[in-house]
Amino acid sequence: MKSVSILGATGSIGQSTIDLIARDPDAYRVVALTGGRNVRQLAADAQRLGAEIAVAAHDDAFGELSTLLAGSGIEVAAGRAALVEAAARPADWVMSAIVGSAGLEPGLEALKQGKTLALANKESLVCAGRLLLETATAHGATILPVDSEHSAIFQALVGEEMASVERVIITASGGAFRDWPMDRLRTATLAEASCHPNWAMGQRITIDSASLFNKAMEVIEAHEFFGLQASQIEVVIHPESLIHSLVGFADGALMAHIGPPDMRHAIGYALNWPQRQHLPVERLDLARIATMTFRSPDEARHPALRLAREVMEAGGLSGAVFNGAKEHALDAFIEGRIGFLDMATVVEAVLERLSGEDLGAASMDLETVLHADTSARREADEAINRLRLRAHA
Ligand code: NDP
């Protein structure tokens, strides 16, 4: 029986993970489930799966969670420290599916148990790739990618030598606005940016898909996780979202991973690795699909990909700055304080502003990463205020 914990159990990835685990209850013992504001969902899943402990991320949720789980025998806790402690509980397999840099510390704690971390939280790798990989090595832990693109690359690399890899091609659906003209993007609303054409995901990653910030994060994630140079990573728009990524080898061969746009594939692959087991995902009928299309991304419309290359060149803590600024700009867009295109303007301004701080050479531990994250959010706030002042002038 495999012991599992799910960090971010109430979110889109967390719920898909629970869907797979609940189909085979005798195969799993659930240790910890963590959530944020959706305390009812957390309590219901903890009961359904017989979890040892349920943890809500915010202190003020303790009372409600305790009431909901009273008499169940399930331990209840709330707050940041409790969440990090729950991540450190021994489990064979931990899903890291908290959204944002808030997922970094719990992920690091899980790695210290020396088991397997299934990593959906791409922000961890963008902010602190080196720290994450070094922690895994130091504790004999395994990180398995869950982002569909990185799972696809990981699967295409089985049995291959990294030395024979020429390039990877990361596919992008293009998000909600892939066919929108530039002037319409300026006035894009939150509701419009929150609808993905192919994937059902959390709101934040859906908006990041529309701005291509999600793809920029994935490029940095591939650079960190697979040790690829920026020049080896290409992005292609593939509106059908059927090819999840490709690896190009020295002999010219391209290995593609093809499957339905259903995250339960990548989650299930990580859950069953190194074996493959039956998964409840659609089987593709290629004759019915008939065509798949590809085109180059338009970087003039979406500067996020150019910014990702700058981050990879700078290295060090610039990923933490990029992510912190992006998360803060995204909050401002969600709150209606800035427009859709302003998000990239804010991130670029923060990277420029903090580039003098020798981010590339800086040493990396949790403290320095969190400091870079905080500085980036403070600078982003100032950039947002400048934009708002200009708009009202
Ligand atoms: P969701 O927004 O759906 O879920 C996020 C989860 O994190 C929820 O459980 C949420 O709790 C919890 N949470 C939010 N804020 C905090 C916090 N400050 N501290 C602790 N927990 C918190 O996100 P997704 O499931 O879409 O994405 C999760 C991660 O996986 C992200 O890093 C994303 O980039 C990545 N990913 C997602 C994919 C997808 O298909 N959704 C695909 C590939 C990668 P609550 O909801 O209870 O408030």
Image: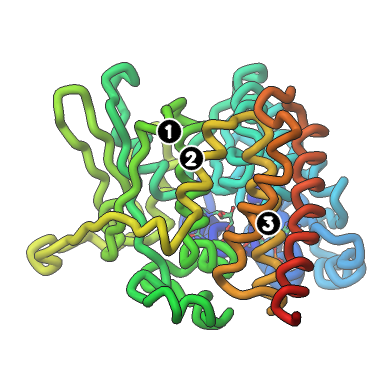
User: Of circles 3 and 2, which is in front?
Assistant: 2
User: Quadrant of the rendered structure where residue 11 is?
Assistant: bottom right
Mark closer to the chain start, 2 or 1 = 1
Quadrant observed for ligand 1 in the rendered image: bottom right
Callout 1: 10 Å neighbours few (<14), some, many (20+)?
some
The three-letter amino acid code for the residue at tag 2 is Arg
- Label 3 vs label 2: CA separation? 45 Å
Residue 65 placed where, x, y %? 83, 67
- Return the mark for residue 352: none
Picture layout, residue 26 above or below residue 262: above
Picture layout, residue 391 above or below residue 148: below
Residue 42 placed where, x, y %? 71, 65
- Label 2 vs label 1: CA separation? 6 Å
Residue 200 placed where, x, y %? 46, 69
Residue where numbered disc 1 is placed: 230
User: Of circles 3 and 1, which is in front?
Assistant: 1
Mark closer to the chain start, 3 or 2 = 3
Q: Residue at x 41, y 67 (%)?
A: 175
The three-letter amino acid code for the residue at tag 1 is Ala
Q: Nearer the viewer, residue 73 or 220?
A: 220
Residue where numbered disc 2 is placed: 309
The residue carrying mark 1 has its beta carbon less than 8 Å from ligand 1 = no
User: Quadrant of the rendered structure where residue 229 is?
Assistant: top left
- Left or right of 189? Residue 393 is right
Q: Residue at x 39, y 47 (%)?
A: 149
Tell me the quadrant of the picture where the C terminus can be found.
bottom right
Which residue is the extreme one toward the front? 393
Query: Mark 2 near mark 1, Cβ–Cβ under 8 Å?
Result: yes
Query: Mark 3 near mark 2, Cβ–Cβ under 8 Å?
Result: no
Residue where numbered disc 3 is placed: 50
